[in-house]
Image: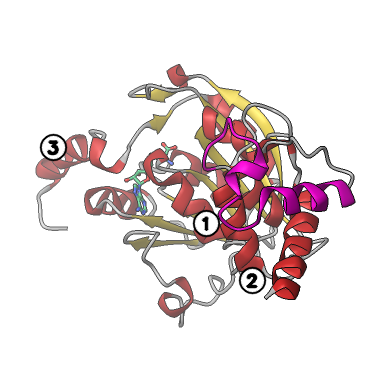
Amino acid sequence: MRYSEKGLIFNVNKMIQPRKQFAQHWLKSDKALNAIVQAANCQETDQVLEIGPGTGILTRRLLPLVKSLLAVEIDRDLCKLLVERMREKENFLLLQGDFLTLDLPSQLTGFANFQRQNKVVANIPYNITGPIIEKLLGTISHPNPKPFDSIVLLVQKEVAERLYAKPGSRTFGALSVRVQYLADCELICTVPAAAFVPPPKVDSAVVRLIPKKIEIPANDPKRLENLVKLGFASKRKMLRNNLQSVIERDSLTQLLEQLEINSQVRAEDLGVAQWVSLVNIIGNQLETSN
Ligand code: SAH
């Protein structure tokens, strides 16, 4: 490091000033930290990925429990701080960079023990929650070919509610379908804004996502992706109205009846399996009528 010991103290203080730009809110609640660690159910064979370690408060708790931990942190100053604080930790590897644009496997060649992360545990930056989840799980048409065993995340409460929402509920949306197609989602606990410094404007929640084998795969995953997006485009409208640019209302009514689904349903009333069945028969119908 460039600076003298005195300078270092000055710099360390400056470094841990949270930056808005990177959505930095330091978690300070023991209760929340314990809940995250417990939900991750760490084993000594686990290789963990943490996104946004910040000052390392969660990292420090995870390290003694696991084989290795790879953390990706975008903030260079925090990386310097972490290097100082974690000097002695042999099972810790820190990558400075933007998680969303990093190509992990190519960065990790040469680091034994850090070759294949099987779990994710993180208090992530809330401004990029959607893209982070998409990078971890993949999408309906391109699921992550090497799914994680489990993903434990601290996220904004409103987002958490959409992740584990049940069909028919107010919070069940396109995100719920996209994520629940790929993973089982459960709420671990809610975390009040006061658990952070500085407190964010919203409450938070810990969720656990367990990527699953896709039970009934869509015949045409891209079509499922598109129709889910279209189906939820106008939430108050009935599904047959939202989809009318793709399939005539009367035809859709018939298909819904075939599946024993009320023809007046809205997008949020259909669970993932129903979405898949519906899009599969819409696909058949469109292909035969072409
Ligand atoms: N886990 C820490 C910090 C959470 S705040 C704690 O619980 O206290 C979110 C963290 O994500 C910050 O450290 C921020 O710098 C980092 N971050 C923000 N955007 C990022 C990105 N694109 N890639 C990697 N890290 C990012």
* Mark earlier in primary sequence (1, 2): 1
Tag 3: amino acid: Phe
Question: Residue 57, image x and y in percent?
Answer: 45, 38
The residue lying at 24 percent from left, 41 percent from top is 21
Q: Quadrant of the N terminus?
A: bottom left
Q: Which residue was labeled with disc 3?
A: 10
Residue lying farthest to the bottom in this orientation: 110
In reply to whether residue 217 is colored magenta, the answer given is no
Q: Quadrant of the C terminus?
A: bottom right
Picture disc at residue 246: none
Tag 2: amino acid: Lys
The region drawn magenta spans 233-259
Front residue (pair 141, 52) = 141
The residue lying at 41 percent from left, 76 percent from top is 107
Looking at the rendered image, the disc whose residue lies closer to the viewer, 2 or 3, is 2
Q: Which residue was labeled with disc 2?
A: 146
Question: Residue 160, image x and y in percent?
Answer: 58, 34
Question: Residue 105, image x and y in percent?
Answer: 48, 76
Looking at the image, residue 159 sits to the left or right of residue 140; the answer is left
**Quick check: marks 1 and 3 in contact, CB under 8 Å?**
no
Q: Which residue was labeled with disc 1?
A: 134
Q: Between marks 1 and 3, how big is the CA–CA gap?
A: 38 Å
Front residue (pair 200, 3) = 200
Q: Between marks 2 and 3, how big is the CA–CA gap?
A: 43 Å
